[in-house]
Amino acid sequence: MHRFDPRLKVAGLAFVSLLMTVTGWQGLALSSFALLGLVFLSRTPLKIYRSLIVVMLWMGLFYGLAAGWVWPANRAVWYGHWSPEGLVQAAFMLWRMVLVFGLTRLYTAVTMPLEQGLGIAYFLNPLIRITPKAADFALLLTLTLRFIPLIIEEATQIWKVRALKLEWPSSWLKRSWEFIQLIVPLILLSLRRAEELAENLILRGYGSGNYRTLMLNERTSKDRLGVVILGAWGLILLILR
Protein backbone atom coordinates (compact mmCIF):
# COMPACT_ATOMS: atom_id res chain seq x y z
CA MET A 1 0.00 0.00 0.00
CA HIS A 2 2.91 2.33 0.61
CA ARG A 3 3.97 2.09 -3.05
CA PHE A 4 0.60 2.75 -4.64
CA ASP A 5 0.26 5.84 -6.80
CA PRO A 6 -0.81 8.85 -4.65
CA ARG A 7 -3.51 9.65 -7.20
CA LEU A 8 -5.05 6.23 -6.66
CA LYS A 9 -4.99 6.68 -2.88
CA VAL A 10 -6.63 10.11 -3.01
CA ALA A 11 -9.30 9.01 -5.48
CA GLY A 12 -9.96 5.81 -3.55
CA LEU A 13 -10.31 7.65 -0.25
CA ALA A 14 -12.74 10.19 -1.71
CA PHE A 15 -14.71 7.52 -3.61
CA VAL A 16 -15.10 5.11 -0.69
CA SER A 17 -15.86 7.92 1.78
CA LEU A 18 -18.65 9.13 -0.48
CA LEU A 19 -20.10 5.62 -0.72
CA MET A 20 -20.07 5.34 3.07
CA THR A 21 -22.86 7.90 3.18
CA VAL A 22 -25.25 5.87 1.00
CA THR A 23 -24.57 2.20 1.74
CA GLY A 24 -26.59 0.12 4.21
CA TRP A 25 -25.54 -1.85 7.25
CA GLN A 26 -24.33 -4.76 5.11
CA GLY A 27 -21.98 -2.46 3.22
CA LEU A 28 -20.80 -0.88 6.46
CA ALA A 29 -20.07 -4.31 7.93
CA LEU A 30 -18.10 -5.39 4.85
CA SER A 31 -16.24 -2.07 4.86
CA SER A 32 -15.33 -2.58 8.51
CA PHE A 33 -13.77 -5.97 7.75
CA ALA A 34 -12.03 -4.48 4.71
CA LEU A 35 -10.56 -1.67 6.84
CA LEU A 36 -9.25 -4.17 9.38
CA GLY A 37 -7.69 -6.14 6.53
CA LEU A 38 -6.04 -3.03 5.12
CA VAL A 39 -4.65 -2.13 8.54
CA PHE A 40 -3.22 -5.64 8.83
CA LEU A 41 -1.74 -5.61 5.32
CA SER A 42 -0.22 -2.15 5.73
CA ARG A 43 1.42 -3.20 9.02
CA THR A 44 0.70 0.16 10.57
CA PRO A 45 0.94 0.26 14.39
CA LEU A 46 -2.40 0.24 16.15
CA LYS A 47 -1.34 3.08 18.47
CA ILE A 48 -1.80 5.61 15.64
CA TYR A 49 -5.54 4.90 15.80
CA ARG A 50 -5.69 5.43 19.55
CA SER A 51 -6.48 9.13 19.23
CA LEU A 52 -9.62 8.27 17.24
CA ILE A 53 -11.19 6.64 20.29
CA VAL A 54 -11.54 9.92 22.21
CA VAL A 55 -12.88 11.70 19.13
CA MET A 56 -15.42 8.94 18.50
CA LEU A 57 -16.60 9.04 22.11
CA TRP A 58 -17.34 12.77 21.90
CA MET A 59 -18.97 12.39 18.48
CA GLY A 60 -21.05 9.49 19.77
CA LEU A 61 -22.27 11.64 22.64
CA PHE A 62 -23.09 14.48 20.25
CA TYR A 63 -24.94 12.31 17.75
CA GLY A 64 -26.76 10.49 20.53
CA LEU A 65 -28.09 13.75 21.97
CA ALA A 66 -28.78 15.32 18.58
CA ALA A 67 -30.65 12.39 17.03
CA GLY A 68 -31.66 10.20 19.98
CA TRP A 69 -33.20 12.75 22.35
CA VAL A 70 -36.55 14.15 21.19
CA TRP A 71 -39.07 16.38 22.92
CA PRO A 72 -42.52 17.74 22.05
CA ALA A 73 -42.92 21.05 20.28
CA ASN A 74 -43.28 24.14 22.48
CA ARG A 75 -41.93 22.22 25.47
CA ALA A 76 -38.66 22.40 27.34
CA VAL A 77 -35.89 20.00 26.39
CA TRP A 78 -36.06 18.11 29.70
CA TYR A 79 -39.61 16.98 28.87
CA GLY A 80 -38.24 14.81 26.09
CA HIS A 81 -37.40 11.12 25.93
CA TRP A 82 -34.98 8.77 24.21
CA SER A 83 -36.07 7.63 20.77
CA PRO A 84 -34.99 4.11 19.70
CA GLU A 85 -35.16 5.13 16.03
CA GLY A 86 -33.04 8.19 16.75
CA LEU A 87 -30.44 6.16 18.64
CA VAL A 88 -30.20 3.68 15.76
CA GLN A 89 -29.77 6.58 13.33
CA ALA A 90 -27.06 8.08 15.55
CA ALA A 91 -25.29 4.70 15.70
CA PHE A 92 -25.23 4.44 11.90
CA MET A 93 -23.93 8.00 11.59
CA LEU A 94 -21.16 7.26 14.09
CA TRP A 95 -20.35 3.99 12.31
CA ARG A 96 -19.89 5.83 9.04
CA MET A 97 -17.72 8.48 10.66
CA VAL A 98 -15.52 5.82 12.29
CA LEU A 99 -14.93 4.19 8.90
CA VAL A 100 -14.17 7.50 7.16
CA PHE A 101 -11.82 8.64 9.93
CA GLY A 102 -10.13 5.23 9.99
CA LEU A 103 -9.57 5.29 6.23
CA THR A 104 -8.21 8.82 6.45
CA ARG A 105 -5.81 7.86 9.23
CA LEU A 106 -4.66 4.85 7.24
CA TYR A 107 -4.15 7.06 4.18
CA THR A 108 -1.94 9.50 6.09
CA ALA A 109 0.02 6.60 7.60
CA VAL A 110 0.92 4.97 4.25
CA THR A 111 1.42 8.17 2.22
CA MET A 112 4.24 10.67 2.58
CA PRO A 113 3.14 14.30 3.17
CA LEU A 114 4.61 15.47 -0.13
CA GLU A 115 2.81 12.67 -2.00
CA GLN A 116 -0.44 13.61 -0.26
CA GLY A 117 -0.15 17.15 -1.57
CA LEU A 118 0.79 16.03 -5.08
CA GLY A 119 -2.06 13.52 -5.19
CA ILE A 120 -4.66 16.08 -4.10
CA ALA A 121 -3.25 18.84 -6.31
CA TYR A 122 -3.39 16.54 -9.34
CA PHE A 123 -7.19 16.57 -9.22
CA LEU A 124 -7.19 20.36 -8.93
CA ASN A 125 -5.30 20.80 -12.20
CA PRO A 126 -8.45 20.75 -14.41
CA LEU A 127 -9.75 23.75 -12.46
CA ILE A 128 -6.77 25.80 -13.67
CA ARG A 129 -8.55 26.25 -16.99
CA ILE A 130 -11.37 28.00 -15.13
CA THR A 131 -9.32 30.18 -12.81
CA PRO A 132 -5.54 30.52 -12.24
CA LYS A 133 -6.20 30.68 -8.50
CA ALA A 134 -6.68 26.90 -8.57
CA ALA A 135 -2.98 26.53 -9.36
CA ASP A 136 -2.07 28.78 -6.43
CA PHE A 137 -4.34 26.77 -4.13
CA ALA A 138 -2.78 23.50 -5.35
CA LEU A 139 0.70 24.86 -4.63
CA LEU A 140 -0.39 26.12 -1.21
CA LEU A 141 -1.89 22.74 -0.36
CA THR A 142 1.21 20.87 -1.46
CA LEU A 143 3.55 23.11 0.53
CA THR A 144 1.32 22.98 3.62
CA LEU A 145 1.30 19.19 3.71
CA ARG A 146 5.03 19.17 3.03
CA PHE A 147 6.01 21.52 5.85
CA ILE A 148 3.61 20.41 8.60
CA PRO A 149 5.94 17.55 9.68
CA LEU A 150 8.90 19.94 9.66
CA ILE A 151 7.07 22.43 11.87
CA ILE A 152 6.13 19.65 14.29
CA GLU A 153 9.76 18.49 14.37
CA GLU A 154 11.00 22.01 15.07
CA ALA A 155 8.42 22.46 17.83
CA THR A 156 9.59 19.20 19.42
CA GLN A 157 13.21 20.34 19.31
CA ILE A 158 12.38 23.70 20.89
CA TRP A 159 10.44 21.96 23.65
CA LYS A 160 13.34 19.57 24.36
CA VAL A 161 15.87 22.42 24.51
CA ARG A 162 13.68 24.37 26.96
CA ALA A 163 13.13 21.27 29.07
CA LEU A 164 16.91 20.72 29.31
CA LYS A 165 17.61 24.30 30.37
CA LEU A 166 14.92 24.58 33.04
CA GLU A 167 13.31 22.22 35.49
CA TRP A 168 9.87 21.31 34.24
CA PRO A 169 7.22 22.82 36.58
CA SER A 170 4.75 20.59 38.38
CA SER A 171 1.84 23.04 38.30
CA TRP A 172 -0.42 22.76 35.25
CA LEU A 173 -0.72 26.55 35.13
CA LYS A 174 3.05 27.00 34.89
CA ARG A 175 3.21 24.19 32.31
CA SER A 176 0.66 26.04 30.21
CA TRP A 177 2.75 29.18 30.42
CA GLU A 178 5.83 27.23 29.30
CA PHE A 179 3.95 25.92 26.26
CA ILE A 180 2.74 29.43 25.41
CA GLN A 181 6.32 30.69 25.46
CA LEU A 182 7.19 28.15 22.75
CA ILE A 183 4.83 29.84 20.28
CA VAL A 184 7.02 32.89 19.60
CA PRO A 185 10.21 31.04 18.53
CA LEU A 186 8.11 28.58 16.52
CA ILE A 187 6.43 31.44 14.64
CA LEU A 188 9.83 33.06 13.97
CA LEU A 189 11.21 29.81 12.58
CA SER A 190 8.13 29.32 10.42
CA LEU A 191 8.37 32.86 9.05
CA ARG A 192 12.06 32.38 8.24
CA ARG A 193 11.32 29.13 6.43
CA ALA A 194 8.45 30.76 4.51
CA GLU A 195 10.71 33.66 3.48
CA GLU A 196 13.39 31.28 2.22
CA LEU A 197 10.79 29.32 0.28
CA ALA A 198 9.38 32.50 -1.30
CA GLU A 199 12.88 33.56 -2.40
CA ASN A 200 13.49 30.14 -3.97
CA LEU A 201 10.20 30.33 -5.88
CA ILE A 202 11.05 33.79 -7.19
CA LEU A 203 14.53 32.69 -8.28
CA ARG A 204 13.04 29.74 -10.15
CA GLY A 205 10.68 32.05 -12.05
CA TYR A 206 7.44 30.94 -10.48
CA GLY A 207 4.41 33.03 -11.36
CA SER A 208 0.81 32.93 -10.20
CA GLY A 209 -1.21 30.33 -12.08
CA ASN A 210 1.82 28.41 -13.39
CA TYR A 211 1.89 25.52 -10.93
CA ARG A 212 1.46 22.01 -12.34
CA THR A 213 1.56 18.76 -10.44
CA LEU A 214 4.58 16.63 -11.34
CA MET A 215 4.10 12.91 -10.79
CA LEU A 216 7.47 11.25 -11.26
CA ASN A 217 6.24 7.66 -10.97
CA GLU A 218 4.31 6.02 -13.79
CA ARG A 219 1.27 3.90 -13.11
CA THR A 220 2.10 0.25 -12.54
CA SER A 221 0.14 -2.97 -12.84
CA LYS A 222 -0.55 -2.78 -9.09
CA ASP A 223 -2.16 0.62 -9.57
CA ARG A 224 -4.39 -0.75 -12.36
CA LEU A 225 -5.34 -3.67 -10.15
CA GLY A 226 -6.18 -1.21 -7.39
CA VAL A 227 -8.49 0.70 -9.74
CA VAL A 228 -10.31 -2.54 -10.61
CA ILE A 229 -10.67 -3.46 -6.93
CA LEU A 230 -12.00 0.01 -6.07
CA GLY A 231 -14.52 -0.15 -8.89
CA ALA A 232 -15.73 -3.60 -7.84
CA TRP A 233 -15.89 -2.55 -4.19
CA GLY A 234 -17.89 0.55 -5.06
CA LEU A 235 -20.33 -1.54 -7.09
CA ILE A 236 -20.82 -3.90 -4.14
CA LEU A 237 -21.49 -1.01 -1.77
CA LEU A 238 -24.05 0.47 -4.18
CA ILE A 239 -25.82 -2.89 -4.45
CA LEU A 240 -26.00 -3.18 -0.64
CA ARG A 241 -27.80 0.16 -0.21
Image (tube, grey):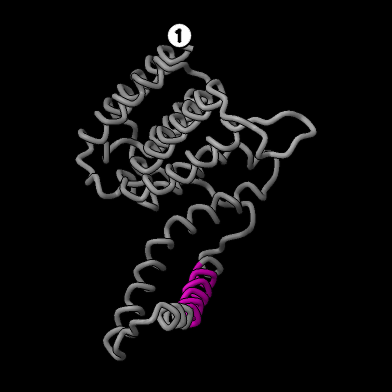
Farthest residue in the bottom direction? Answer: 165
Q: Which residue is mark 1?
A: 239
> 16 and 189: which one is in front?
16
The secondary element bearing badge 1 is classed as helix
Mainly helix, strand or loop, the magenta region?
helix
Quarter that holds the N terminus: top left
At x 40% / y 21%, what residue is drawn?
28
Q: Is residue 198 magenta?
A: yes
Q: Is residue 241 above or below residue 147?
A: above
* Residue 100 position in % (x across, y down): 44, 34
Give left or right: position of 140 versus 239: right
Q: Which residues are magenta?
A: 183-200
Quadrant in the rendering for residue 154: bottom left
At x 76% / y 35%, what residue is drawn?
75
Q: Is residue 55 above or below residue 159?
A: above
Give left or right: position of 78 versus 6: right
Give left or right: position of 105 versus 2: right
